[in-house]
Amino acid sequence: MIKLKIQLLLCFLLVSVIHTQAQETYAEKLGFPKGKKVVIFHVDDCGMSYSSNQGAIKSIEQGVATSCSIMMPCGWAPSFIKNYIQKKNPNLDAGLHLTLTSEWKDYRWAPVAGFQHAPGLVDEEACMWHTVEQVVKNASADEVEKEIRAQVERALKIGLKPTHLDSHMGTLFASQAFLERYIKVGVEYGIPVMFPGGNNKLLIECQNAPLIKSLKAKGQWKEGMELPVPAMLKQTKPVGEMIWKAGLPVLDDLHTFSGDWKPEGNATPEEWGRYKAQKFIETLKSMQPGVAMLIVHSSDITDEFKQISGSGGSRYADMLSMMSPELKAYIESEGIILTTFRELLERRKKVK
């Protein structure tokens, strides 16, 4: 009987240890305090236009944004690196927004590697495809790897050592073969790759946004309701563990949905910005402890941007939300820790 009790106790302790390990967040593994919410407010699309560059600068200098990433095939990328990062903010957390699509109608860009060297990456205009689906259908993994390496090398040539890599329009997450090359390049260069391998509560909500909207319309939505896990997210934990073992940091969660936030009616730009700031506060309340990246596409809209895209209103509201006093006050009052990929890598190097 005593032997049986000891065996049961050992089993209980083993299960407890396994449970505890499973609950440990990547933030805790990186040395952040247990139970803390750690956040990267991240500005995508730097280098895409002058407006995009100015939006990122204001979001970082006057707002809560801590990180950004640059689209190396685009015309305003060198200016952002040379005139802002190198001259004014050399310690900026600036990564590469690895770009395999050219989505706008008239404002287009071509592969850094050259369209002759990656024919599967380009359309009849010798520019990158408009959609993610077209890239998946036409491009090989070898062409994708060649292009993302070319984008890294262009950044290094200009004088930027990227603090991280991520994916424009999520193209590198749309194919298992593309994802493998994305991780491969990051590991080889020793550059963190943006990857959510933790609880993914916010990301699951983003992926289920149409379902949530439908349930709310029917009066069937309840806060805390368990949502289905999209198929693409079911393998994130083992992939995250692989990236961690390769010596790179991993995120616990990712939020990608601010572009669809818009108040009802004909809101002014300021009202739209305040609305988004409030939505970010709600998002921070909803997130679980861990390290999460929240994405915005801040732009300080000028007349030239209106010739590129009709998304200017949302992008300007993103910039205003980052500069919101209410959002900043909430972060400070709740003790939320703002961080960068640069800090995550430094912390990861100290973990055995």
Image (cartoon, rainbow, N blue to C red):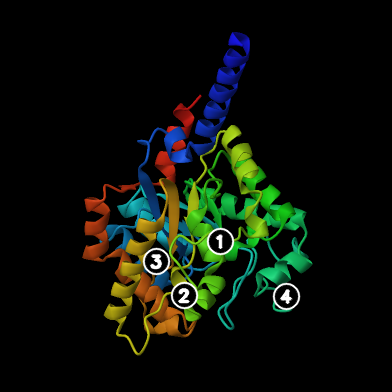
Is 50 rendered above or below residue 250? below
Judge left or right: residue 304 versus residue 103: left
Identified at 36% across, 89% down, the residue is 265
Secondary element at tag 3: helix
Residue 307, how many percent across, how many down? 47, 85
Dots 1, 2 in contact, CB < 8 A: no
**Residue found at x 69% / y 78%:** 125
Quarter of the image containing the N terminus? Answer: top right
Circle 1 SS class: loop
Q: Earlier in the sequence, mark 3 or mark 4?
A: 3
Question: How far apart are the two marked residues, 3 and 2, measured between alpha carbons?
Answer: 21 Å
- On the image, numbered disc 1 is attached to which residue? 227
Q: Nearer the viewer, mark 4 or mark 1?
A: 1
Going by the numbered disc 4, the residue's amino acid type is: Asp
User: Up-down: is 189 above or below 121?
Assistant: above
Category of crowding for the residue at label 2, using alpha-carbon neighbours closer than 10 angstroms: few (below 14), some (14–19), many (at least 20): few
Q: In the image, is 31 to the left or to the right of 352?
A: left
User: What residue did someone put label 4 on?
Assistant: 123
Decide which of tag 3 and tag 2 comes sooner along the chain. 3
Q: In the current view of this chain or complex, which residue is farthest to the top?
A: 2
Residue 239, picture quadrant: top right
Tell me the distance, in whole angstroms, between the alpha carbons under discs 3 and 1: 36 Å
First in residue order: circle 4 vs circle 1 = 4
Residue denoted by label 3: 53
Where residue 19 sits, quadrant-wise, is top right
Q: Is residue 339 visible?
A: no
Q: CA distance from mark 4 to mark 1?
A: 38 Å
Marks 2 and 4 sit apart, C-alpha to C-alpha, by: 28 Å
Q: Label 1, label 2: how many angstroms apart (C-alpha)?
A: 19 Å
Tell me if label 3 and label 1 are in contact, CB under 8 Å.
no
Q: Which residue is mark 2?
A: 260
